[in-house]
Image (spheres, rainbow, N blue to C red):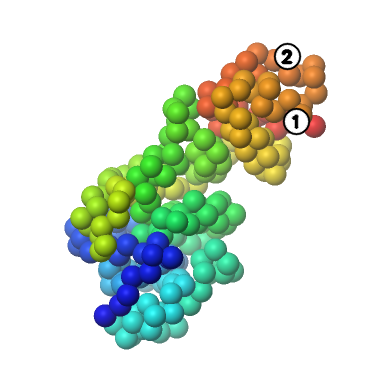
């Protein structure tokens, strides 16, 4: 029926139990507007179309899959956006939820798109490569705690929900997968400026083996760099620590 395209990172979900678990995780938080990223062969789509009282849209970049989806699911007419999720405008003018078995080759970019839309994304339930899911949810002190961990958790609560075996996909990927959920933080972290936060975090982790003092010395006055916090490495700082430091950046 369809061809799998390696260039698009396509691994289609076929495990109905996993589909139902994703739908169950989605239903734990109410929503009225829902967008699916990369419906592919429609494994999740067939369940999402059955949800009552929800305005639903799906975004698919693969023209062949767009045609097949419309043939298989006539209810998708006028609900399917043929395009690149990373390039489209916000699919709704109000708050919405995002769900998907995300293409692993662009999953981090999808996360940063969701951060861009953070004021409107009320929930995200997504399938990632296990290592990426772990990085997003990791805590300070972990070797995998990094840029994506801090910048996601600055705006969202990240939950590691469950893992998914390779056999749940066609074709089976060479890596394990995991589903996570993001929900907006109840309380914002202290932060002077989001652009400063992004710059600080990326600079700090760019040289993560160095102490913070050496890694970010160009971003602060010499006197302030004497503070004890700069004796630490980037992976030892909490999300709140990074936010507080933005108030003293040059």
Q: Secondary structure at mark 2?
A: helix
Camera-side residue of 218 and 15: 218
Query: Dot 2: few (<14), some (14–19), or many (≥20) neighbours within 10 Å?
Result: few
Relative image position of residue 211 (x, y in whole percent): 62, 20
- Looking at the rendered image, the quarter that the C terminus falls into is top right
Relative image position of residue 218 (x, y in whole percent): 76, 29
Residue sitting at 67 percent across and 43 percent down? 194
Quick check: 144 above or below 50? above
Quarter of the image holding residue 38?
A: bottom left
Residue on which the image places disc 1: 219
Residue on which the image places disc 2: 226
Residue 42, disc: none
- Looking at the rendered image, the quarter that the N terminus falls into is bottom left
Relative image position of residue 134 (x, y in whole percent): 39, 39
194 left or right of 135?
A: right
N-terminal-most mark, 1 or 2? 1
107 left or right of 161?
A: right
Q: CA distance from mark 1 to mark 2?
A: 13 Å
Q: Secondary structure at mark 1?
A: helix
Residue sitting at 38 percent across and 42 percent down? 131
Query: Dot 1: few (<14), some (14–19), or many (≥20) neighbours within 10 Å?
Result: some
Total labels: the figure holds 2
């Amino acid at each position: 029926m369809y061809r799998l395209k390696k260039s698009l990172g396509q691994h289609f979900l076929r495990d109905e139990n996993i589909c139902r678990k994703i739908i169950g995780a989605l239903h734990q938080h109410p929503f009225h507007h829902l967008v699916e990223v990369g419906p592919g062969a429609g494994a999740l789509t067939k369940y999402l179309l059955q949800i009552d009282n929800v305005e639903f849209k799906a975004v698919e970049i693969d023209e062949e899959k767009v045609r097949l989806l419309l043939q298989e699911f006539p209810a998708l007419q006028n609900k399917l956006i043929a395009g690149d999720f990373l390039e489209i405008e916000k699919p709704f003018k109000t708050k919405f939820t995002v769900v998907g078995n995300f293409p692993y080759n662009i999953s981090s970019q999808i996360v940063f798109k969701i951060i861009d839309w953070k004021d409107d994304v009320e929930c995200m339930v997504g399938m990632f490569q296990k290592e990426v899911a772990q990085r997003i949810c990791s805590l300070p002190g972990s070797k995998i705690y990094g840029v994506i961990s801090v910048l996601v958790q600055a705006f969202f609560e990240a939950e590691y929900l469950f893992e998914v075996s390779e056999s749940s996909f066609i074709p089976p990927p060479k890596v394990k997968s995991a589903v996570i959920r993001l929900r907006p933080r109840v309380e914002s972290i202290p932060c002077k400026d989001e652009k400063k936060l992004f710059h600080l975090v990326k600079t700090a982790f760019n040289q993560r083996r160095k102490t913070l003092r050496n890694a970010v010395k160009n971003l602060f006055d010499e006197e302030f760099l004497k503070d004890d916090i700069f004796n630490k490495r980037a992976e030892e700082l909490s999300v709140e620590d990074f936010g507080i430091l933005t108030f003293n950046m040059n």
